[in-house]
Amino acid sequence: MSCENDRVLPNIVLIGFMGCGKSSVGRRLAALTGHRFVDTDELVAQSEGCSIPEIFARGGEEAFRDIEEKVLADLVGVAGIILATGGGAILREANREAMKKIGTVAWLDADPDSLFERATRSNRRPLLQTENPQKTFDDLLALRRPIYEAAADFRFDSTGLDHDEVARNILDQTMRLRARF
Ligand code: S3P
């Protein structure tokens, strides 16, 4: 990626609830743009040398959030990236500020039923390992929706679209937004 291209195409930060497809769409965006794909969950796991469920089991959610905040802060100033963030990364003000500095923030949304189905396909999401995952999911989504809205430069509803279509739309919207400034 040339410096010239970095100036034309900003970093893109993907936010959204568990199961919205941030990592899959992020990889496609990286392929489309030549930017490097970065995933905060992967960086958190790498920095601790263990999986996200293990980090939650050892230190609880707060321990995970502290590492997540550090990982995001370290990405401020890095150019040429497509960044997928964990679904709860928007919860901390410091993270929302870091995201704005990193790039254009796109909220990847979908209808709640498909989000729930995708988020619970595997057991790798500690927050949904409860007695009533549907209620936990509903409560978390209700709490977070306004925060995604406030944190994002734009929202994109991916319901019914494949990852390639979503990636192309996010890129289009990012470039349109960019052209306005
Ligand atoms: C979380 C979402 C997960 C991961 C962690 C916490 C959340 O990432 O960061 O389990 O609070 O919503 P995904 O959104 O990629 O599943």
Image (tube, rainbow, N blue to C red):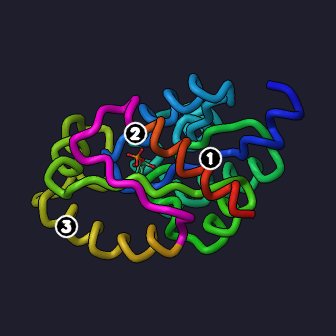
Q: Residue at x 62, y 35 (%)?
A: 38
Question: Closer to the camera, 77 or 149?
Answer: 149
- The vertical placement of 161 against 137, above or below, is above
Which residue occupies the foreground of this view, 155 or 19?
Answer: 155
What whole-number distance in Å separates the C-alpha atoms at marks 2 and 3? 24 Å
Q: Earlier in the sequence, mark 1 or mark 2?
A: 1
Q: Is residue 38 magenta?
A: no
Alpha carbon separation for disc pair 1 and 3: 27 Å
Q: Residues within 10 Å of mark 1 (few under 14, many from 20)?
A: many
The amino acid beneath tag 1 is Ile
Q: Which residues are magenta?
A: 151-165
Q: Residues within 10 Å of mark 2 (few under 14, many from 20)?
A: many
The image quadrant of residue 44 is: top right
Q: Callout 2: helix, strand or loop?
A: helix
In the image, what residue type sits under mark 2? Val
Q: Quadrant of residue 122?
A: top left
Q: Nearer the viewer, residue 39 or 157?
A: 157
Which numbered marker is on residue 138?
Answer: 3
Q: Which residue is mark 2?
A: 166
* Residue where numbered disc 1 is placed: 12
